[in-house]
Image (tube, rainbow, N blue to C red):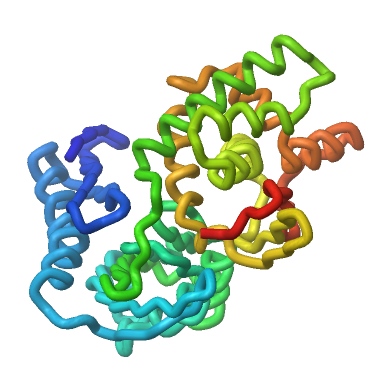
């Protein structure tokens, strides 16, 4: 855990606790940031730790000691996958709590079908739901494995607008914890730490080739050399295809990019949701964690400019417009022939 303290206003203190949790049976690290306010630093820390207890501790204890709240099956990569779901508490803050019903697990029933559609072969998936209507501002954010889903967030925003009283002054937060059965789980061959190292290596190669070749840079050479270095041509294709777009999404927050994607690999075409891919959340995390650290700023800027999203933003700017509030259609990606989604 890591604690941050702030004094936003006279007489009010804010504490934010950042939590990372791991387990040998998981294929990813659970992360959350829990905040609390108080008149003193001690009171703010106590409120933040209560937030941690209500969300993280309860969720993981619920999973460890109680049967699942629901079970279901999905199909992915030619196999059936069986899942168990544990639903965390819905915690509510604000003056208008009684005006917004929390009965009957409203967020799970709202998002369940879309979440199921976005499960691939991961061992563990966690979903964070944040909904608020404080003053004129609506907050509606859904994250799968800490990656914002624009599609699920749009469903949540519509729900808040259509079912909550206007400016009700309520904040809700909930986690879903989804675990695949051991009998149907096929381990992915790369850990999050390995994928991070491969993203750093991709940055080194990209920088080297762009410096050498300038406008004559060829993505095929970048992908081929990366595949040779990491020993996995499919993952190299994903890094070359996804990392520049992830970088652009971080760099141009006015863009709304949906979860859908069309992948062309030789004669094969795959229509899928990016969260289904075992590597995708790890790639998103790797870009965030290495941003202007192991991957220098010049590479970050070059990746964003090289991406399809960066080119779209460039066209808007050439036309004298800013790329704000733009929803992007599903992107198309080209992968090495023989590639199969994992």
In the rendered picture of this protein, how many numbered marks are placed on residues?
A: 0
* Outermost residue to the right: 319
Which residue is found at the position 51% from the left and 72% from the top? 76
Along the viewing direction, whichever of 325 and 184 lies nearer the viewer: 184
- Quadrant location, the N terminus: top left
Query: Measured from the top left, where is residue 126 in percent x and y?
Result: 34, 63
**Can residue 331 be seen by looking at this rendering?**
no
Which residue is found at the position 39% from the left and 65% from the top? 129
* Outermost residue to the bottom: 104
Q: In the figure, 283 relative to 140: above or below?
A: above
Along the viewing direction, whichever of 334 and 128 lies nearer the viewer: 334
Which residue is found at the position 74% from the left and 56% from the top? 264
Along the viewing direction, whichever of 70 and 263 lies nearer the viewer: 263
Query: Measured from the top left, where is residue 325 in percent x and y?
Result: 70, 52
Which residue is found at the position 61% from the left and 27% from the top? 225
Query: Measured from the top left, where is residue 314 in percent x and y?
Result: 81, 34
Query: Going by the image, does 21 lie left or right of 312?
Result: left
């Amino acid at each position: 855990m890591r604690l941050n303290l702030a004094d936003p206003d006279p007489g009010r203190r804010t504490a934010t606790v950042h939590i990372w949790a791991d387990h040998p049976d998981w294929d990813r690290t659970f992360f959350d940031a829990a905040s609390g306010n108080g008149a003193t630093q001690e009171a703010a820390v106590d409120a933040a730790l209560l937030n941690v207890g209500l969300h993280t501790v309860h969720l993981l204890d619920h999973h460890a000691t109680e049967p699942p709240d629901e079970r279901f099956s999905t199909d992915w990569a030619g196999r059936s996958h069986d899942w168990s779901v544990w639903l965390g508490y819905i915690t509510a803050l604000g003056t208008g709590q009684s005006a917004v019903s929390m009965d009957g697990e409203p967020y799970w029933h709202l998002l369940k079908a879309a979440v199921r559609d976005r499960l691939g072969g991961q061992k563990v998936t966690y979903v964070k739901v944040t909904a608020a209507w404080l003053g004129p501002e609506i907050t509606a954010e859904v994250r799968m494995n800490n990656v914002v889903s624009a599609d699920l967030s749009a469903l949540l925003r519509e729900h808040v607008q259509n079912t909550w009283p206007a400016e009700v002054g309520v904040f809700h937060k909930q986690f879903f914890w989804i675990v695949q059965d051991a009998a149907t789980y096929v381990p992915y061959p790369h850990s999050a730490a390995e994928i991070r190292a491969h993203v750093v290596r991709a940055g080194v190669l990209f920088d080297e080739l762009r410096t050498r070749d300038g406008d004559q840079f060829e993505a095929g050479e970048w992908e081929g050399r990366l595949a040779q270095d990491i020993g996995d041509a499919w993952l190299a294709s994903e890094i070359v295809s996804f990392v520049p777009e992830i970088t652009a999404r971080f760099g141009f927050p006015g863009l709304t990019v949906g979860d859908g994607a069309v992948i062309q690999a030789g004669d094969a075409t795959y229509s899928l949701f990016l969260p289904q891919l075992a590597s995708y959340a790890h790639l998103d995390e790797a870009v965030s964690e290495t941003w202007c650290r192991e991957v220098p700023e010049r590479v970050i800027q070059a990746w964003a400019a090289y991406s399809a999203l960066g080119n779209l933003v460039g066209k808007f700017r050439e036309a004298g417009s800013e790329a704000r509030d733009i929803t992007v259609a599903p992107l198309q990606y080209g992968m090495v022939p023989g590639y199969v989604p994992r």
